[in-house]
Amino acid sequence: MSRVPLPYNKKLLDLFRNPKNLGRMEDATVSAVAGSPACGDMIAVYLKTSKDETVENATFESYGCAENIATASVSTELVKGKTLKEAWKVGWKEVAEEVGGLPSVKLHCGILSVGALRRAIREFYTKMDEKPNWLPNELTPEEKQALEEEELVKALSKKVRAFSEKARGKKA
């Protein structure tokens, strides 16, 4: 069986080879993770906010494919200088357009980057006394995907541990 290579555009390849905002932020105000066990992609987003809730800095760490790195890079660029309310409005379609388009089998990378971003923003407000009225009570589809995948990872880890313990018990 042969595999057809994915069509990578020049902008996406450049963002993959030269990502912006790559790295852990030690003084982040808030951070969040999103991941996909189906393909192995993981993104951690770090936000540093000012007192007026403006994103002063945004960085990411990534374990994943070219599209994962490119979309995380673009997501962090898109939110810098915006208020958290404005950053919340950044959507996966906008991210996909900014990387020059994504193959349909890689759309989840844009969703993951926005999911991690929104999880970080929601986490910021869980630490506050009052939640803003623009922040929905219900999780967005991007957040749900990130959470569902996180729960799947936890469940799989539990099963692997149980299997490993059972296997060690048989060898003793």
Image (cartoon, helix red, strand yellow):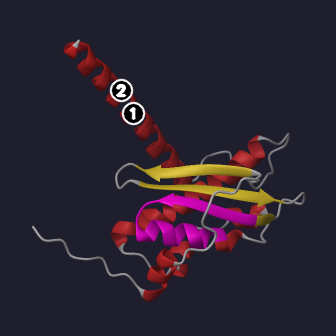
Q: Is residue 165 magenta?
A: no
Residue at 36% across / 71% down in the picture?
104
Indicate the quadrant where residue 165 lies.
top left
Q: Which residues are magenta?
A: 57-76
Residue at 77% across / 53% down in the picture?
27
Indicate the quadrant where residue 153 lies.
top left
Q: Identity of the amino acid at label 2?
A: Arg
Which numbered tag is attached to residue 161? 2
* Mark 2, other Cα within 10 Å: few <14 / some 14–19 / many ≥20: few
Task: State whether residue 116 is above or below residue 65.
Answer: above
Indicate the quadrant where residue 46 lies.
bottom right
Q: Identity of the amino acid at label 1?
A: Ser
User: Which of 84 and 67 lies nearest the eye of the viewer?
Assistant: 67
**Disc 1, SS:** helix
Residue 100 visible in this rendered orientation of the protein: no
Query: Which part of the image, by quadrant, shows the N terminus?
Result: bottom left
* Mark 1, other Cα within 10 Å: few <14 / some 14–19 / many ≥20: few
User: Which of 27 and 99 lies nearest the eye of the viewer?
Assistant: 27
Taking the image as shown, residue 105 lies to the left or right of residue 170, namely: right
- Most extreme residue toward the right is 51
Percent of width and height locating residue 62: 51, 60
Percent of width and height locating residue 143: 56, 51
Distance between the Cα atoms at labels 2 and 1? Answer: 6 Å
Residue that badge 1 annotates: 157
